[in-house]
Amino acid sequence: MLTHLNEINGIPDAIISMYMSKRTWTRQLEEDIRGLCHDVLDYSGRIRLNAEKQKLEIFSRWMDTLIKWGRKHNTMLRFIDLSITVEGLHRAGQDDWDAHAKRFDNRIIRTSTRLAKFKYEMSEWYQDKILPTDLALREVGIAIPPEVFIDGQKYIKAVNGYIKEGFQENLDAKRGLYMLCIPSNFIFKINLTEWAHVYKERQESGHSNPEVKQCCESIASQLESCHQQFNRGLFLEILN
C-alpha cells in the first residue's frame, strides 16, 4: 500500500486570510504574499530547492503565524487543500476511509468493484495472513469442479465461488464474491482542518485496522516533510 501527496494548494490564500479580520489587508500586501509564495513554492506546494534564504525566512514566519492562529480559528486552515492518491489499500479499509466522505466534501473517487474485475487479489497487508479457500484447495491438490448443479440449475466457477449460468460475466454478480482484502486505489481532496479530524480518528494510537493506520501515518509523514508546520502535533490541536 502506497500513499502519494500530490499537491498542497491554497497556502497563499490562507496567509492572506490572517490580515482580513483587523483590516490590515491591502491589495499590495496580497500581491506581495502571492508573489513571494510563487517564488518559494513549486507547482505542488512544496518548498523550491533553489528558493532564496531571505524569502524562505519571511515565508516561514508567515506560516508560523498562520499555524498559531489557525489551530483555534480553523477557517484559515480550510483554505489549504490537500490532494492525495492511495494505492492498494484493502477494500474494507477503503470503506473505513469512505466514512469520512463528508470531511472530503465528497471529493473521493475509488476503484469500483462494479466496473472493474478482480482475481485472487489482496492488499499487501493481507498477503501473508490469509488464504482464500480456492487457493488453499489448489495448494493441497484438491480439484475444484468447473461447474456444479443445484436444484437443476447450473453454476459456473468464478473467483471465490460459483455464479449462476447466464450471469457468469455479469460484473454485478461477480462482485458479490469479492473478498474485502482486495486492493483498492482512490484519490481524494481534503482541507487541512478536516484532515486533522481524519488524523485523530485513524492515527497509529487509535483503534482502526492496521493498514488504515499505515495509510494515515504515511500521509502525515509526507505532509510534515513538505512543511514542518504541518505536523502531528498540529493535527491533534486543530479544533474541528
Image: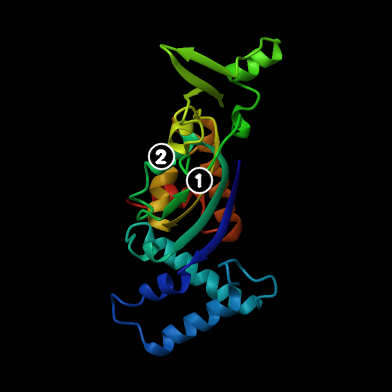
**Image-based side of 147 in relation to 127, left or right:** left
Q: Is residue 208 visible?
A: no
Q: Nearer the viewer, residue 153 or 103?
A: 153
Which residue shows up at 47% across the image and 38% down it? Answer: 171
Q: Which residue is mark 2?
A: 201
Q: Residue at x 48, y 85 (%)?
A: 32
Q: Quadrant of residue 19?
A: bottom left
**For residue 190, above or below residue 44:** above
Q: CA gap, disc 2 to disc 1? A: 23 Å
**Position of 233 relative to 53 (above/below):** above
Residue beneath the point at 33% across and 57% down = 72
Q: Which scheme is used to colour this image of the protein? A: rainbow
Relative vertical location of residue 232 with respect to residue 136 in this rendering, above or below: below
Residue 166 at x, y percent in the picture: 46, 30
Q: Dot 1: few (<14), some (14–19), or many (≥20) neighbours within 10 Å?
A: some
Is tag 2's residue or tag 1's residue first in the polypeptide sequence? 1
Q: Amino acid at mark 2?
A: Glu
Hey, what amino acid is under mark 1?
Thr
The single residue placed furthest to the front in the displayed view is 152
**Residue 174, visible in the rendered structure:** yes
Q: Element at badge 1? A: loop
Dot 2 surroundings within 10 Å: few (below 14), some, or many (20 or more)?
Answer: some
- Residue that numbered label 1 is attached to: 111
In the picture, measured across the screen, residue 22 lies left or right of residue 80, that is: left
Q: Quadrant of the N terminus?
A: top right
Residue contact between numbered discs 2 and 1, judged by CB atoms under 8 Å: no
Could you tell me residue 101's position as x and y percent? Answer: 37, 48
In the rendered image, residue 105, in percent from the top left (x then y), is placed at 35, 56
User: Could you say which disc has been placed on residue 88 in the image?
Assistant: none
Q: Quadrant of residue 159?
A: top right
Q: At numbered mark 2, what does the secondary structure look like: helix, strand or loop?
A: helix
